[in-house]
């Protein structure tokens, strides 16, 4: 099957340095493998996502010359498909009602307090968990090599507020979009076993996952929309791209005023991202302050 990759930003705010980096690496990985590159807007969480953020994200990506090969897809248009997948899992008697409150649960894998409900019809207006007996988390990552993330235990696939959980939605999306390569930041490594597990339950084939280092702030904290991470300037993509080149320790003769396409051309000339990315788990962005 030919390579199909994607970038899947959440519509919870404009793109920051870390998100442009994630978009760039998944794009470069797809291009290096002569693959197709897609953009999916994760806007399922109607409490946190706003349509104006989707617009800003798509405009910013095109200002950065990161243009998907097909029109972007939106999770919010796929709710029926997610519910169908949920019902497949329920029909397999792999799903149970969980009435635990967050405060009742210890940190780490779910201890299975509600597992005795496995096999019973799910109750309405409650969270639903999926039975993970038999789940193996170790696999060979495209960027990290062999990894063995913590076992998540039975995880939530439908939230108490009725929303389909990201793990289920994302697993279904990769099938709908026929994704072969999920290339994303290391902050999402722990999601992989859960998403693969849902795919297994839905009889979908195993796909390639690759997790590259993420960009953290100078203080070591993850850059995120929830923290101080400032939006990139769509009018000056070269400024962000030169920050990225600096973080990667790559030499070049482009100025921050060079066009987005010139920068993309340069990054593509570096070859396989697996080779040129540093092996550290994250890159520290002191350049953020500029
Ligand atoms: N939208 C999610 C995020 O931005 C998922 C990304 C992914 O699976 O690549 O964290
Ligand atoms: Zn419970």
Image (spheres, rainbow, N blue to C red):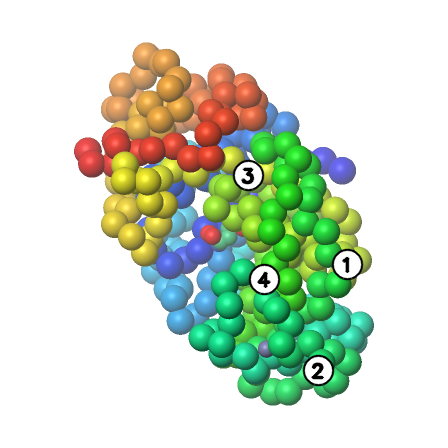
Could you say where residue 206 lies in the image, as x and y percent from the top left?
A: 74, 46
Q: How far apart are the two marked residues, 4 and 2, measured between alpha carbons?
A: 18 Å
Label 1: few (<14), some or many (≥20) within 10 Å? Answer: few
> First in sequence: mark 1 or mark 3?
1
Q: Is residue 216 visible?
A: yes
Residue bearing mark 2: 117
Q: Quadrant of residue 153?
A: bottom right
User: Which quadrant of the rendered structure holds the N terminus?
Assistant: top right
Q: Earlier in the sequence, mark 4 or mark 2?
A: 4
Which mark, residue 109?
4
Q: Name the residue: 31% across, 34% down.
A: 285
Location of mark 3 (residue): 211
Identify the residue at horizontal 56%, vertical 85% (top origin): 125
Helix, strand or loop under label 1:
loop
Above or below 211: residue 95: below
Asked if ligand 1 lies within 8 A of label 3, the reply is: no
What residue would you read off at disc 1? 134
- N-terminal label among 4 and 1: 4
Relative height, residue 43 to residue 261 (above, below): below
Residue density around tag 4, few if under 14, some if 14–19, many if 20 or more, within 10 Å: few
SS of the residue at dot 2?
Answer: helix
């Amino acid at each position: 099957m030919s390579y199909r990759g994607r970038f899947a930003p959440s519509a919870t705010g404009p793109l920051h340095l870390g998100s442009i980096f994630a978009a760039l690496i998944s794009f470069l990985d797809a291009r290096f493998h002569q693959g197709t590159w897609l953009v999916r807007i994760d806007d399922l969480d109607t409490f946190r996502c706003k349509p104006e953020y989707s617009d800003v994200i798509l405009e910013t990506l095109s200002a950065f010359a990161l243009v998907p090969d097909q029109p972007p897809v939106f999770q919010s248009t796929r709710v029926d498909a997610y519910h169908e997948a949920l019902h497949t899992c329920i029909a397999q008697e792999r799903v149970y009602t969980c009435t635990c409150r967050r405060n009742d649960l210890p940190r780490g894998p779910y201890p299975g307090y509600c597992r005795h409900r496995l096999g019973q019809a799910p109750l309405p207006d409650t969270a639903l968990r999926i039975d993970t007996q038999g789940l193996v988390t170790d696999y060979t990552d495209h960027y990290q090599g062999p990894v063995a993330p913590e076992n998540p235990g039975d995880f939530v696939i439908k939230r108490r507020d009725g929303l389909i959980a990201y793990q289920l939605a994302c697993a279904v999306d990769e099938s709908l979009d026929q994704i072969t390569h999920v290339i994303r930041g290391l902050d999402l490594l722990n999601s992989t076993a859960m998403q693969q597990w849902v795919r297994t339950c839905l009889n979908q084939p195993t796909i390639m996952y690759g997790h590259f280092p993420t960009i953290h702030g100078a203080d070591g904290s993850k850059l995120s929309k929830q923290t101080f991470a400032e939006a990139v300037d769509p009018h000056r993509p070269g400024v962000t791209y030169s920050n990225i080149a600096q973080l990667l320790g790559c030499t070049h003769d482009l100025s921050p005023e060079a066009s987005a396409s010139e920068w993309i051309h340069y990054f593509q000339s570096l070859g396989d991202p697996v080779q040129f990315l540093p092996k550290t788990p994250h890159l520290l962005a002191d350049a953020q302050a500029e």
